[in-house]
Amino acid sequence: MSKIKYLILLIPIISAMFVVTGWGYELTGWRFPFRAGVSVSCAAILWLMSGQEARRTVWWVVAALLVSSVADWFMMNSGKVHAYFLYGVCLFFVAHVGFLVFCLKNGRIDRWLLLPVLTGYLAFFFVVLRPGISEPVLLAVVLAYLIISCFSLSAAAGLRLPAMAHWCFAAGIALLVFSDTIIALRVFAGYKALGFLILPTYFASHLMVALALMNEK
């Protein structure tokens, strides 16, 4: 029974497959319900399968996943309304706050990881991204998002959870940061070669987070 319960992860996995392969749009003409289905189902799985004690902190992750689904809608429609991209980044910032708070309540920031990661991403921002951002507000928001992403990743590495949960969660945040890096390269630097990895790594990040914490009691 303990292994069978993992079959519930087929719900977000199938939803992700419908998006990545395009089957969802071909069958229904809809994209967003399947995209949101990954985050929302992962959030529901976490809430329903975590214990009462764990929910005191897991709800931060549940909230982060739900906020991510809303942020994804803005990002998906940013081609229609220019400001939607900014709104999407702001909401994903809020999602990272949720991930960060959960990590801090269950561990600490790994300073040995934070220093090189933050230094590297600040260099990446000023050398690669900064020349492609002309709007001051967007510049500030992207910089703030980059910084909190580094803190979230370093905090995930410093989690004090059982080994499997620890590394699955850290891998999930790492995949999220990787996905965001590809988006930044595509939007601000015009580098589109890795664009095909954006959604698979984004969905995989949420699946890894759900896998990490669904056994927490």
Image (tube, rainbow, N blue to C red):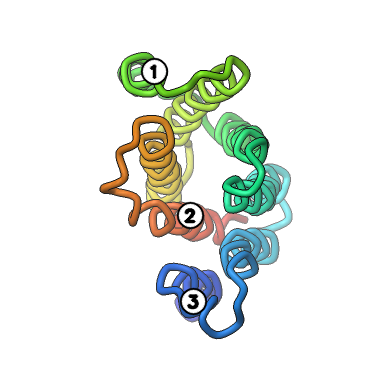
Q: Which residue is mark 1?
A: 131
Q: Residue shown at 69%/51% (left/top)?
A: 70
Badge 3 crowding class, 10 Å Cα cut-off, few under 14, some 14 to 19, many 20 or more, is some
Mark 1 in CB contact with mark 3 (< 8 angstroms): no
Mark 2 in CB contact with mark 1 (< 8 angstroms): no
Q: Which residue is mark 3?
A: 14
Q: Residue shown at 60%/51% (left/top)?
A: 72
Position of 49 compared to 3: left or right? right
Give the Cα distance between marks 3 and 2: 19 Å
Q: Quadrant of residue 116?
A: top left
- Marks 1, 3: nearer the viewer: 1
Q: Quadrant of residue 17?
A: bottom left
Q: Earlier in the sequence, mark 1 or mark 3?
A: 3
Residue type, mark 2 in image: Ala
Q: Residue shown at 65%/62% (left/top)?
A: 40
Q: Earlier in the sequence, mark 3 or mark 2?
A: 3
Badge 1 crowding class, 10 Å Cα cut-off, few under 14, some 14 to 19, many 20 or more, is few
Position of 64 compared to 131: left or right? right
- Marks 2, 1: nearer the viewer: 1
The answer to whether residue 189 is above or below residue 115 is below
Report the front residue among 95 and 84.
84
Q: Residue 171's x, y, as percent?
A: 38, 46
Q: Residue 53's x, y, as percent?
A: 70, 50
Residue type, mark 3 in image: Ile
Q: Residue 97's x, y, as percent?
A: 63, 32
Q: Residue shown at 51%/81% (left/top)?
A: 26
Report the front residue among 17 and 204.
17
